[in-house]
Amino acid sequence: MKKAIGVLALILVCAAPAAMAQQFELFGSYWDTSDVDETFGGGVGFGIPFGETGLGLHAKATYYQELSNEPLDNVFDDDEGVFQDESLEVLPIDVGLHYEFAPMGAFSPWIGAGFSYFMIDTTFEGVDVDDETGFHVSLGSRFGASDATNFFVEAIYRSTESTLVREIDDDIDIREEVAIDLDGIGVNAGIMWRF
């Protein structure tokens, strides 16, 4: 219930700025974390430029789930899944400022930084994990006309640490806590619509 209320609050907070957005993104993502290894995911984002200054507010949400040992081989194998049956699921929501160096150009590199809220869940039985906060920095570029459909690519570094809590014995309330480090670099690439 607590997570559902958190998700609803985030949707409401993002809904008003998204209505003013002049940029929408749909992208695939790769993320290599310290403790959970590599994973692939996908996400959506929007941006609100502050005039023609090059500065703007940007928000992205990306979904990741732990992969099986051979995810690419398993794409072509009906008996094996791409994702682990019991896994960690992470939805980072990144909100921050971007500065574009050539906002009206056909090639526009940018730098960005901000805070991240990590919605974390697990399908492991008897294991619970709390959501966490952290930060991100990014470096990327848009390729294409400034007011049309564009391709973009960015490198993003996120930092946070979470704690898994495992119930060992429910009768006498014995728990084990394990810290997981989610620091790591990722790459986002996709389509951006600007108008």
Image: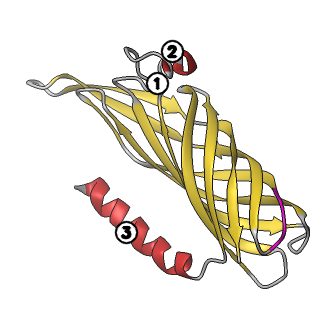
SS class of the residue under badge 1?
loop
Along the horizontal axis of the image, is 25 left or right of 113?
A: left
* Marks 2 and 3, how far apart at CA: 35 Å
Q: Residue 155 appears in which quarter of the rendering?
A: top right
In the rendered image, residue 14, in percent from the top left (x then y), is placed at: 49, 71
Taking the magenta stretch, the answer to whether it contains residue 15 is no
SS class of the residue under badge 3?
helix
In the rendered image, residue 174, in percent from the top left (x then y), is placed at: 20, 24
Give, as a three-letter code, the residue at label 2: Asn
* Marks 1 and 2, how far apart at CA: 8 Å
Circles 1 and 2: CB atoms closer than 8 Å: no
Residue 60 in view, yes or no: no
Q: Identify the residue at image location x=49%, y=80%.
A: 16
Judge whether 75 appears above or below 100 on screen: above
Q: Nearer the viewer, mark 1 or mark 3?
A: 1
Residue 124 in view, yes or no: yes
